[in-house]
Amino acid sequence: MNPAIQGLMTIVFGVGGCLAYFFLSNVVLDTFIFPAKGKNAGRNINRANMVRPWLFLFPALLVLGLYLAYPVFETLRLSLSARLPGGGYEFVGLDNYRQLLNESKFWEALRNNFLWLAVVPAASTAIGLLVAQLTDRISWGSAAKSLIFMPMAISFVGASVIFKLIYDTRPAALEQIGILNAIWLQFDGGIWSTITLKVVPAFIIVAFGIVCVWIAWLLVRPMIQKGSRPEGPFIKVVRVILAVLALLLAFKSVTGLISLLSATLAYGQPQTWLTVPFYNNFFLMVVLIWIQTGFAMVILSAALRGIPEETVEAAIVDGAGPFQIFFKIKVPQIMGTIVVVWTTITITVLKVFDIVFAMTNGQWETQVLANYMYDKLFRAFDWGVGSAAAMVIMLLVTPILVWNVYNARKEMR
């Protein structure tokens, strides 16, 4: 059958089926179950109105149960089982998780995921906030926003192909079509090469380490400072975990700084950027930052426009400068929106798969949890360990979802 006809039939039967369901279910409810006639007409009408919302919710609950709840429980079952050679499954308890923890590739994937978590949400949110602020101050801001938002319309695989061409490498005798290598070959090892490739990256790494330590202090300070608002044990545990991760990243920045300063750069030779351990992860992160910056910009731009002008005018009257207005007046008022954008991008990062799969396939120390899970499920056909990896991803995402719900309820109160 022609795909166009199939698509048309899907629309007709899908929409028609929904309309038929809602019409017929209401007819059955009002005519046969709780008819609005007889001596109990008033009570039946009230009961029908109580049941009616569930008729509308039932399709959504069914789909959520079928495509969300059931896969979670089935994945949990598979993670506790092993496939038998002749077919069927055998309960093995936590053996799959033990095997998972004993594999170096899993720890590599977990480490890289935390690295992505530290860099991508922060960079995307910060750049998006900066762009949102700057584009609102220029006449052609709308056009600039459209261009920056445009990558959101590109799939992760499409963006990966674009950046794979940017990172492309050809022999030194041939003309480089990869933009990054074309720029790299312009450096000759002089003073400007040292400043650009050693001093500036070293400054960025040091700044990143200082920010990580500062974030760790901000997370721990409410727990040790007298007079702080009491918090539940769950929030305290989350704070400690995040603080430890921030300190680990700070330590990683120190080791990265040492590696950078002691490295011998191969000037004049094209580089296969995606095969350079550790740094190739950042080349992959650029793709997701490029995509997610537009999302952050749109949401934060709307939040900035919603700030009452009176607060900004009052700050100007009090003599506040542009930086003070931005950081002390505007940012605190949209902090809730910033957190939502940050956590939304964080969830995307935890599930990142397409970019790694399309560009490196997890080679050269770029493995991430989603790609590791795919390798186990569909290459090694080890459904037990693959399902265990899926459960690990779900466990990492769940605290962020809980945090979002907690913040939403706090704002409602």
Image: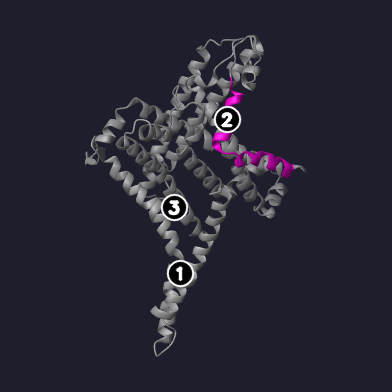
Q: Residues within 10 Å of mark 1 (few under 14, many from 20)?
A: few
- Label placed on residue 161: 2
Q: Residue at x 42, y 49 (%)?
A: 402
- Label placed on residue 53: 1
Q: Give the Cα separation between the discs numbered 3 and 1.
A: 26 Å
Image: magenta residue range:
141-168
Residue 250 shows up from this direction: yes
Q: Position of residue 308 (x, y in %)?
A: 66, 54
Compared to 311, does 202 lie above or below?
above
Left/right of residue 253 with respect to residue 167 in the rendered view: left
Q: Residue at x 55, y 36 (%)?
A: 156
Residue found farthest to the front: 1
Compared to 192, does 44 lie above or below?
below
Q: Secondary structure at mark 3?
A: helix
Q: Residue at x 37, y 40 (%)?
A: 390
User: Was residue 410 drawn as part of the magenta stretch in this picture?
Assistant: no
Compared to 195, does 245 lie above or below?
below
Q: Give the Cα separation between the discs numbered 2 and 3.
A: 39 Å
- The amino acid on which the numbered mark 3 sits, given as a three-letter code, is Tyr
> Can you identify the residue that label 3 sits on?
406
- The amino acid on which the numbered mark 2 sits, given as a three-letter code, is Val
In depth, the one of 298 and 270 nearer the eye is 270
